[in-house]
Image (cartoon, coloured by chain):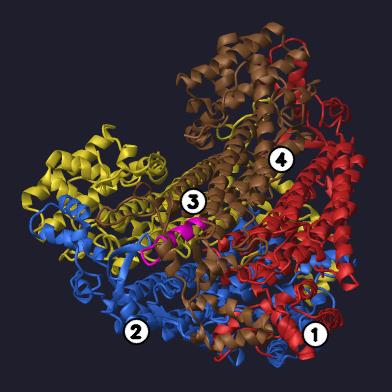
Chain colours: A brown, B red, C yellow, D blue
């Protein structure tokens, strides 16, 4: 089938291959979104008299049919199609003739692809948040279970002060809950309908942009038509930033777990079913999943920085450069979700070795506790500090559980306040649940069903 | 004066120079914050009986005095002090003896520096938001003034469709208003008091962390003491991300302005007072400010990526690596503020050349409008598109003002809806105003005055 | 087939999917390299008596057969194989029994994958250099052809001084010739055989590493077995850096061409066959190839920065993190090659519009020439500069061709010295030709044929 | 004093502050270079009759005097000067009148600043290489001294196979020697004289660019005048890339040392004089220097990526964006040198704890050695591997020294081949020594003395 812009010349083959790039493959992830957005667009064109009721019905029916074909593996986007938008329009024109030729009235591929990406991102964020919440709940349960299991606290990777497995796990639960703020912000900015901005400058037709936004379940309409096109890449960057922060948190958690499961520590044991072996060394059980979480943080950062570098100093209005953001964005989304799920599984299966943890409590770990005892007896802290520091040999072993119970102020080992994080997470869950229902209702009303716009495979 | 941790050996000179780095210089920007946070800490230590009322009063008085000395240029942080924290403790001990030696009870430099950075960031965000709002208001005024001045709309930098100076300016006003969401998110996450987490593991004293948070005007207490230390660099990254998005938006605006003030366009003129000359070419007036805004987007991105790279996969608890985030963070904050102010000035002074703008309206710019007229006459869009595309020579010139008025749907040239953005900006202003008052009240109560924690110089 | 390390437990399905990732797909690009490297390893094992002559012959025969199967599309790496190394060993064991089970003696997947990557990189660099040389020759021809076509020289994007199309094209030819130095450096560092380092610590067998290096046509043996494994990612980064510099140069060239083919300039015309259209605007011919070259510079930078971020601060010895560098590396290589080819085609087809170029010569462009005339008459330069600058209205139009001829010093418009660059490029061509022959000879001796290790598709 | 381009209007104060930025401070590091380059330029202007012999002598004398003033701390670049170039021209004009006003004939600040940066980089690279060689020699000595000290070899941070302290140190010596290839490449590309390219388009004067190149001791002349200006930032990026690779290598070394000096390992001890303490924990001795080396790798990567991001897709010819590369470049150079010196000191002082190293040799470490013994007895490797893997409990402890001696092939623990690296390093030393002599001779001839263009302070 021909390209949408085909007129009277053919594109050079090398340039065609280069400009299409992997778009025709990536667009498998956008095809359903674009079908659904096209259905909403058709309904709106009907409402302003550009399409007849019959045309709207026929288009909606064929778009639903196309989704079905695609799900069954019977619809393919070919390189010669360039992208899903062309493939869909050609399919509709093939099936319906003039109605197909009319579907593009009042829109451009520019706003179409942004709309498809927003639907994709929206479902990605729903799924990402769902898994993030599972992970936080897993960490909270793990923290509660191991609340009073002592763990050497470190700074500079050296032995510092008494700590606990509970504090360690709860620290990550809280950090991920802060990261969820970023996910929510990204959701909010992404939840804005771009359709009707067309190539970047709107159209001289009385299109009803608010209607399309409502039909697709968006929270708002993105107003300025030039800004809509300028925001390509930008919203993707904001979504990836939230994902990146989560995975940066996981990279730290992975580093801790890799370190503390080394034979010299064995604070934690990662069960064999989560470990790969070596091709040459018969004894190896390697924490490969965690190593890859650590490495994949770099992949997400790179995806994000590619997107931002592409949009930096780009003149306003649509530029083809935007296309290059698509692969980076999708790769970042998929990778971040994988990492959260692997970490959730790891925490679920992680074994805690209390003996080894307690063996880490060498007398020096109590140096600060000792100095603060001298303070309670009236010695100024700086003197107590020097006194203890110059006579470390006088430090004695203590009961580590008593030491961690003794820190009772907010957020310390003796007072983790897990319920605070639990409450925050409950609120996020409710917030996203409400948004999800709004979306489900809108899509079901429009199409009679609710296909997923993001698939994790 | 000696280092806080000095006991019985001296640090190698090369290593001392390396580890202190530029900290003793950067800390000039944190000294006031640390004095104020120390005053709050002292009040709290008084409330739990570690310090007497006299000691609290003496410490508060001397901290206020030290701020005065610093403002007058009579207090210096020396390289041998390592940082502002040491300089302050040494000053207090020099003035007050034992009360000075007690000030560090129940805290560590780790939570101290985080607290000082949060106060610095908070005031930076107030000032940044204030300037951002000024810029958005400037753009809205510029858009209103030039609402119906035609401007060739471009995609791929080629002539695309009729647009207007109003649409162009309003696009940036809206984009910056979306960026403000990120500033607000950063503010929220930064607005959490870290004090009392000490080295990363709390202390065995009944410290009242909530009280300190209140005294410093924080919106909340950051709970888990290990998370507090793990969040070093992270909150800075989130703040820089907001700044980066703003400056990425400005880099696009700068690119547009540099382009459209070239002699071949002259859509806009940048007045001479904003332009530098050349050392060799007598005729040159160069848009250097805009070029540097464009370049400085890279600086902020680099600052941010340094911070994130430093915290990636860093084991939990304090690590000295964190120190290296400080310079990047401060540089990013200062740079972003400069860019916003220069752009605000540029928009204020920018001259619009209506003649040149209208000359850009070649007949081809109306190709899409023409195709959509054929659609109104009943031709399916795809056919109308081909019809027009194959006979471009038939296109005629039109009245550009009519063309931009004809796009009346939401967000298009004939319907900018500037009031929507104005309303959003009013809300941000009110939000930050309220936060600022809360902070001003708290600091004034604590200290009797309200010194700035962030200075733009 | 089972994994190489399979013993008595099964890997969790989610973790398996995560750890295998896209490796089984990416490894289609390494399979031939690994077959060839395995053949060299087998010959060496024969030379030290670990394999019999029959076993060596059988293995070599089956490896050649496997390459044939793969070329015909009859060999697939399955996700359950994990990677090409497993697929190959399993194939050999299936075909040959014990000989297959022996092939892994004295090696590890760690050094295997490094070897396969080096062979891949080597052929990539041959092909990349070949195309780079074509591009430079194209630019030199274009410069020669347009040596005295005037072109407004710009600084700050403003009109600066007289320049020429020849100077413009020659500047890029020279820059790419400097970039070739980086390609050659990357080639040199990559041209070092890693085999025999095994997991990172060598083996207690008298393996002959020098022999393997020779059989595979490497220029040297990479000595320290731990360094070999530490250099994973590092050599890839160095290769990508060369590619990145080339594409950064192309991004600048693309920006110039996009700019100077705008309707306001039309210095250059990009023929329609290299331009794509718009889905909505009938008149558009967009320089999409150039826009994507500009954008893809960000992709290569991101690939590179991912690789460097992954290896940063990674403990020595093999870590699974390395696997994540593979996709980034391959993506960077393929992208850079595409960009060079598209640019080469663009320069070949580019049309020069002399009229429009000359129209850009407004009187101000001669301001510096005029000031230097005053200097020749004895006025100190700074005074001449001010004199001209304060009376720009006195400047008159001149003959632009005379103006560019008048700059006769080395490297200026009147003296491009193209032969210097041509000579440098001839030397690079000869250098790489010699290396390529060495490699072709070695591989042909080993295997009886010379399959490509890098395929551009 | 006035700006070089000052004519009839004043720059807005905010814009002036913004555009000057920190240039007037950074240029303290370029002032001497610019004086020397100016002297060479004056001599050349004399040779073509633009300056009289007296003027040349007077200018050379005053430039030498200015260097003296600057060394004594009696010359300052003020913000109102903008940069060192202006300060110097103003100084010369103040002292000499017309001769000063003539010095800028045939050059621009654009080529001046590039020349000053090349001189700066050249001396930086001399010093960097000198320190790098010292570090490699230190590592080779350390490797020789600890050649047969056993050390558990790890992959995935888990116990893998027997290794040695010698192998560990020699791995880094070899890696840094590969990094030196990049330093040499950077030197070569930097060693090219840019002067005479002026604003980007040369000048209509018969300037002798080759003479200037020779007078300044450059290895070659950078030919195309537009390329010269396009290469701003590019050469800096190539220099920083070499520095970055070195520091990435150091970041790995630092990570190893931090890890292996933890109390659970104590393979190595870092003497107290290289460690800082804690403000709260009396017992702490922290490897702060190594942590900062680890962190500073991110700083250098960020500096580099800022430079590359600035030059990406920048239109050809000078753009003010280039100025923003200066601070990043200088910061990267200084930081990299510090890191090399700290690491050199650390290796010099590092203590090896043989007992703890040997205690790491648990029976499993010999699993691969055992499997290969079975191979020697005729069992196919894959069977031997499974046999050992399923009966790890049968593995027994061995003599670790014998185990590391037993790996005798090239580059293994029993055959480190340190002399190979020593030879390569000797060659680098000789290469750079020769270049340095060439430079010293040229500068001394020109000026009568040889001031340093790069100062490490």
Q: Chain of mark 4?
A: A
> Is residue B327 rendered to the left or right of residue B153?
left
Q: Marks 2 and 3, Cα distance to the nearest angstrom?
A: 37 Å
Residue A189 place in picture, x, y as percent = 71, 40
What residue is pinned by disc 4? A189
Q: Residue furthest top?
A: A54
Q: Which residues are magenta?
A: A253-265
Marks 3,4: beta carbons within 8 A: no
What residue is pinned by disc 1? B75
What residue is pinned by disc 2? D141
Residue D153 place in picture, x, y as percent = 31, 67
Q: Secondary structure at mark 1?
A: loop
Which quarter shows the C terminus of chain C? top left
Badge 2: few (under 14), some or many (20 or more) residues near its Cα, within 10 Å?
Answer: some
Residue C448 vs residue A97, the one in the foreground: A97
What residue is pinned by disc 3? A296
Q: Quadrant of residue A51?
A: top right
Provide the major secondary structure of the magenta segment: helix
Q: Is residue D435 visible?
A: no
Q: Chain of mark 2?
A: D
Marks 1,4: beta carbons within 8 A: no
């Amino acid at each position: 089938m021909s390209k949408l812009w085909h007129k009277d010349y053919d594109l050079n083959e090398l340039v065609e291959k280069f400009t299409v790039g992997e778009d025709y493959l990536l667009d498998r992830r956008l095809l359903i979104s674009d079908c659904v957005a096209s259905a909403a667009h058709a309904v709106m064109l009907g409402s302003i008299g550009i399409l007849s009721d019959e045309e709207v019905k026929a288009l909606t029916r064929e778009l639903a049919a196309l989704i079905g074909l695609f799900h069954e593996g019977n619809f393919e986007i070919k390189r010669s199609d360039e992208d899903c938008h062309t493939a869909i329009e050609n399919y509709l024109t093939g099936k319906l003739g003039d109605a197909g030729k009319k579907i593009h009235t009042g829109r451009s591929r520019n706003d179409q692809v942004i709309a498809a990406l927003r639907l994709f991102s929206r479902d990605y964020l729903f799924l990402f948040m769902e898994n993030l919440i599972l992970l936080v709940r897993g960490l909270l349960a793990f923290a509660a279970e191991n609340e009073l299991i002592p763990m050497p606290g470190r700074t500079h990777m050296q032995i510092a002060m008494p700590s606990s497995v509970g504090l360690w796990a709860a620290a990550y639960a809280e950090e991920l809950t802060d990261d969820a703020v970023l996910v929510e912000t990204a959701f909010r900015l992404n939840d804005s309908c771009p359709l009707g901005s067309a190539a970047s400058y709107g159209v001289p037709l009385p299109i009803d942009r608010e209607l399309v936004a409502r039909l697709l379940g968006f929270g708002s309409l993105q107003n300025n038509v030039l800004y809509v096109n300028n925001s390509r890449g930008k919203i993707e960057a904001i979504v990836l930033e939230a994902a990146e922060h989560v995975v940066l948190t996981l990279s730290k958690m992975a580093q801790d777990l890799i370190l503390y499961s080394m034979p010299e520590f064995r604070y934690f044991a990662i069960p064999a079913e989560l470990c790969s072996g070596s091709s040459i060394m018969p004894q190896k059980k390697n924490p490969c999943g965690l190593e890859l979480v650590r490495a994949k943080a770099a992949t997400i950062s790179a995806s994000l920085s590619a997107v931002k570098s592409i949009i930096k100093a780009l003149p306003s209005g649509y530029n083809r450069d935007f296309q290059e953001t698509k692969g980076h964005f999708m790769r970042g989304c998929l990778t971040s979700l994988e990492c959260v799920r692997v970490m959730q599984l790891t925490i679920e299966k992680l074994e805690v070795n209390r003996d080894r943890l307690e063996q880490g409590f060498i007398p020096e770990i109590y140096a600060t506790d000792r100095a603060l005892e001298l303070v309670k007896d009236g010695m100024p802290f700086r003197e107590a500090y020097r006194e203890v520091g110059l006579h470390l040999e006088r430090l004695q072993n203590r009961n580590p559980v008593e030491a961690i119970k003794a820190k009772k102020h907010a957020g310390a080992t003796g007072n983790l306040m897990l319920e605070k994080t639990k409450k925050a997470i409950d609120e996020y869950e409710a917030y996203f649940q409400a948004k999800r229902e709004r979306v489900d209702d809108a899509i079901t009303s429009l199409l009679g069903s609710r296909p997923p716009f993001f698939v994790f495979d």
